[in-house]
Image (cartoon, rainbow, N blue to C red):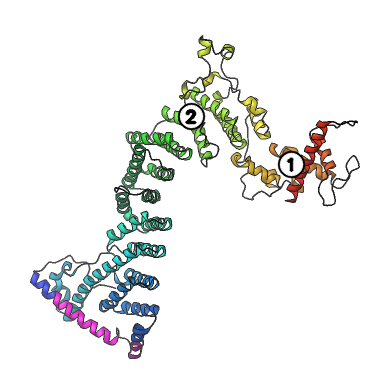
Amino acid sequence: MTDLVTDRPAAPVPEGVASRLLQEAAAALSQGVKAFKADGAGQAASQWSWTQTVLTSGTVSDKLAARQALLRARPQFGLHLIDDTVRMVAAKGKGHAMQAMNMLADLFGQYLLPPNRKLKLFAQQPLGALQDIAGGDPAVRRRQLIFWLFEERLKAAYKEFVGRVREMAHDTVEKSRKHGVNTLAQLLVAHPELEQTLLETLANKLGDEKKSVACLAVRRLSSLLRAHPAMRTVVVKEVERLLFRQNVGKRVQFYGICFLSQVQFSDEGDEALAQRIVRIYVGFFRACVKQAELDARLMRALLTGLSDCVGRARLLATELQQYMQPLHHIAQLANFGVATQALLLMFRLTTAGGQTEPTDRYYCALYKKLVHPGLATSQKLADFLNLVYRSVRMDSCQPRARAFIKRLLQGCLHQTAALACSVLLLVSELFRRRPELAHVAGQATAAAWTADDHSDGEEARRRYAPLYREPRWCRAELAALHELAPLARHLHPTLALFAGQLIAGRQAQYSGNPLHDFQLMHFLNRFCYRNPKKSASVAETARRLPVSSAEYARLAPSQVPHDEKFFHRYFQWRDEHGLTASAAGRPLTDASGDVTDEAFDDFLDGFFEKKRKAGDGVDFLTEIAHGARRHWRRMMSTAVTT
């Protein structure tokens, strides 16, 4: 609807004059409503007769469509239709109530409410300038008074409608609550009228008992900020008021923090907003540490949000140091995943604050996490290893960097092959970047290694102390990297290869993702001849081919990874002898096409470079070997069949 005068400031008049103008406006509006009901907004007689029939005896959908058409044509004379439709929102039938709610939301947002301002009361209009506005024309004066009174009554009707929508948002039925939340967000995006009421109700739905409703509230608040970026500060203040309310539940806190972490910043001018959000995060950190309640889910959301907005806040070095204290507590008390996020944020804050390297306290916390029980099973393992690499690479204290390398290698002795290979590649890259750390033999004297535990001389005091909490003083630079020796004899071929390369002073190289490629499940998939995924990150040709394919068997041995040498030898042998008999004249396959026991025994003899000795008598070791071969053959046949 287009109003007549909207840009003039309020011009107050005496109370008696305002009362007479209100009565005049009411009389004019009443006459207009009577005319509207008589001719139906200027419709033809037949069309108005049909419209009246629909309004009285049609279906609910038809009634709503007819009301909407009439209100679009003459909204100022259809207030009774608006009031009737608002009452439908509170009806017992939820389906009809939702239909009426949808119609009113569209009608208010697109046709009834003025686009860029809030509705005014009749007394707030420029009544004193009415004579100038009308210019002596009675028709203009009448239309202006009708419009001002209509706006006041429309404001009351809209307030009533918003109240009904709020009730719907708190309904016992989840579907109704979702519909109410969607309508609240739609009204809030469309118009600033009752903005604070709508925003408060929508923010309170972050604590809804149903996860789906709370997540919907987060999405709707985020879409509101995308539609109106200027409202970011207002919305953040409202969410902050909700989060720090007394006796607020953990659910509200979690979804509130999730929303704050999704606030998007512009390129310039958002420092104050980012600083406000940072203060909210840090306040939560301190409260959680003080209460000794470190909810892992809430901590992850807090750390994610703080990591995203700390760069925008442009905090001073003194402020950064104040925020470090709660992060240190979280790194010590939380689980491995949350602690890794805290350490990542500490590293970022330190480098963002202008320091050349992290503090000693940071390195102590990171050093302690190298032996955490949840290291191997954490989903943050890749992030943690990357953090260790970056931290050690920029550490100016060589003894401390050497201590990290020692502890990493010690962990390889009892970790999975995937993690151990990743660590060896990490150490190899550190050696390449910092050659001064690459002395495998160490700097210790012979006396330092031969002194017994009872020696109280200078040599005993100069031995490596792996249990020291402070890596700077554990004297790791004096010790050799003797952990590489057992790793070079490891049963995993690639792990042994990497360790041998480090001992020989060469760089261990691998172009794939060791955390994925050397997992047990990846090996079992290859063992069962499952085709690798096309999206695999490994660049080697061998890993992109099924092990049972002819292309795989034709690869040169140098093209096959060490952990797949056995597969390659077996299928190469099978293809070479697939159409002929074995050397002993026995068939290679049975009637079903599987490799026979005898043929597979011949392959194992050649693979392990063993020769069976013919002779009489019983040799139980030979029988055990034959039984093991038959069992191995059955496993391979089952895998082929699968």
Point 56% across, 19% down: residue: 479
What residue is shown with label 1?
A: 567
Q: Which residues are magenta?
A: 22-49
Q: Is residue 28 magenta?
A: yes
- Location of residue 82 with respect to 53 vertically, above or below: above
In the rendered image, the vertical position of residue 365 relative to residue 22, given as above or below: above
Q: Disc 2 residue type?
A: Tyr
On screen, residue 232 versus residue 589, left or right, reads left
* Mark 1 → mark 2, Cα distance in angstroms: 39 Å
Q: Nearer the viewer, residue 592 or 1?
A: 592
- Look at 57% across and 24% down and name the residue there: 438
In primary-sequence order, the first of circles 1 and 2 is: 2
Q: Position of residue 1 (x, y in %)?
A: 29, 73
**Helix, strand or loop status at disc 1:** helix
The reply to whether the magenta stretch includes residue 26 is yes
Q: Percent from the top left, x then y, of residue 274?
A: 34, 45
Instruction: Report if residue 434 is visible in the image.
Output: no
Which quadrant would residue 567 be assigned to in this image?
Answer: top right
Question: Mark 1: few, some, or many residues within 10 Å (few <14, many ≥20)?
Answer: some
Name the dominant secondary structure of the magenta segment.
helix
In the image, residue 488 lies at what x, y percent?
A: 66, 28
Mark 2 surroundings: few (<14), some (14-19) or many (≥20) residues within 10 A: many
Residue 68 can be seen, yes or no = yes
Amino acid of disc 1 = Phe
Q: Which residue is denoted by mark 2 in the rendering?
A: 367
When the figure is inspected, residue 21 is found, relative to residue 37, above or below; the finding is above
Q: Front-most of 29 and 174?
A: 174
